[in-house]
Amino acid sequence: MRDADPRRRVPRTDALLADPGLADAVGTLGRERVKAAIVRAQQRARRGEITPEEVRAAALAELPAPAPRAVLNATGVVLHTNLGRAPLSAAAVDALVAAAGHTDVELDLRTGRRARRGREALDALAAAVPDAAGVHVVNNGAAALVLAATALAADREIVVSRGELVEIGDGFRLPDLLQSTGARLREVGTTNRTTRADYAAAIGPRTGFVLKVHPSNFRVSGFTSAVPVRELATLGVPVVADIGSGLLAPDPLLPDEPDAASTLRAGAHLVTASGDKLLGGPQAGLLLGAAELVERLRRHPLARALRVDKLTLAALAATLHGPVTPTRRALHADPAALRARTERLRDRLGADGVKVEVVPSVAVVGGGGAPGVELDSWALSLPERYAEPLRTGEPPVLGRVLHGRLLLDLRCVPADADEAVRAAVLRVGG
Ligand SMILES: *Cc1c(COP(=O)(O)O)cnc(C)c1O
């Protein structure tokens, strides 16, 4: 009875390659890789480790899932570091895709000559912050600081308040970063109080610049004092201000968050910031300020190592030109509209037999920005046991577990993804 031998029922390679799931994988991973996975699964079946019927699933299971995976952020944290901070606008995504091939990133198509790299992004940044005579873009906020410290203070001193030597997250400590450039830190004042006189006493011939750091992820309250940029600017040395979040202009919702325009107008000579926090763009480090200083940074040899790629430049230009970013929309979402939206989703889930409640929620800016700012929001409240299957499902839906409940706050979920949230909850079951 040769046909009873299960090995004869192992599916053929060409039949498996035509299977829709594996054919899709050929599109994303290439034929060689998928074929190798199929062959290994067939061998396992021939050795009797799996049944012939399991070959397809075994081959699929061996293939890597796309990474990183897109997730739905229902945590109510607008800039979630573990979820990649700012999501790009549709315009920025389109620009990024268009830039993926050959582009005119460093060529003027009219003249056929070499042109300033990333000029659209730089022009858009300059137009957005007219107070900045010079602008430059590097890989991230940390790189912006490293470039400033290297070009302006290597073998010199950076005068900085003890209250501003911050750890941003994941062990990233500003003092260590600055010292890695060869600059020496000249710490002044105390954790809670620093005065203009403290700075003035520390300034001398070795001073590279005075650094003002926005303590973006914590607040000190009580008996405190700090020196505003406006006063630091009278000390007679360059003032570099790390504002962190990338706000270009004031936002009334975030009164304590410094913005680039106001900081420059207050007298800062150079401002550094991130592109993927409140600006809502791609990961990038922004440098804005006096033309001569920015030019020195741009011409420094290290600048080449911190250069941004064409994808970042395209996404940044589109973010600056484009419509309201998802970050801004989430930040400024109207609580009443969020409540109505959440109640609609509750009603539809109720009709499907899933009992959920709508409860008030508190959303936050996150991403090391605007500590203490609470955004009134609303959430679907589900039993905690939903958390794990929703997180590991497709698409993964991430909420916040609080007092034994899973809260799904729609503030940062794109409006057209409510159906995906509903389907995900339904898959977990009532
Ligand atoms: C976030 C932040 C940084 C680091 O910026 P990255 O873009 O994450 O490198 C530096 N300084 C401050 C004040 C920040 O908030």
Image (cartoon, rainbow, N blue to C red):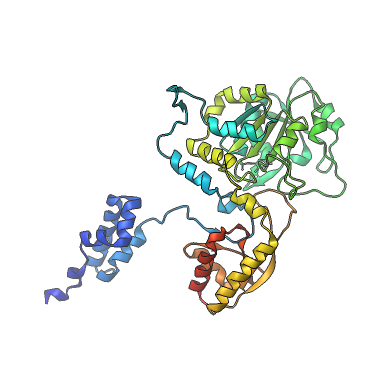
Q: Furthest-front residue in view?
A: 110
- Which residue is more in the foreground, 283 or 105? 105
Disc tally is 0
List the single residue furthest toward the left: 1
Which x, y percent locates residue 264?
73, 32
Q: Residue at x 81, y 32 (%)?
A: 230
**Is 368 rendered above or below residue 45?**
above
Please give the name of the residue rendered at 52% of the width and 58% of the height, measured from the top-left corner: 71
Instruction: Please identify the quadrant where the N terminus is shown.
Output: bottom left
Q: Residue furthest bottom?
A: 353
Above or below, comparing residue 146 to residue 413 in the picture:
above
Residue 113 locus on image (x, y percent): 44, 21
Query: Which residue is rendered at x = 53% and y = 60% of the image?
Result: 416
Q: Residue 240 at what x, y percent from top left?
A: 71, 31
Q: Position of residue 177 (x, y in %)?
A: 64, 36
Please, is residue 126 above or below residue 281 in the view?
A: above
247 or 32, nearer to the observer: 247
Among the 4 quarters of the image, the one containing residue 73 = bottom right
Front-most of residues 345 and 80: 345
- Horizontal relation, residue 357 to residue 111: left or right: right
Residue 184 visible? The answer is: yes
**Horizontal arrangement in the rendering, residue 120 relative to residue 186 (left or right):** left
Tell me which image quadrant ligand 1 sits in. Answer: top right
Q: Indicate the quadrant where residue 211 lies.
A: top right
Q: Residue at x 25, y 69 (%)?
A: 52
Residue 145 visible at all: no
Q: Quadrant of residue 357?
A: bottom right
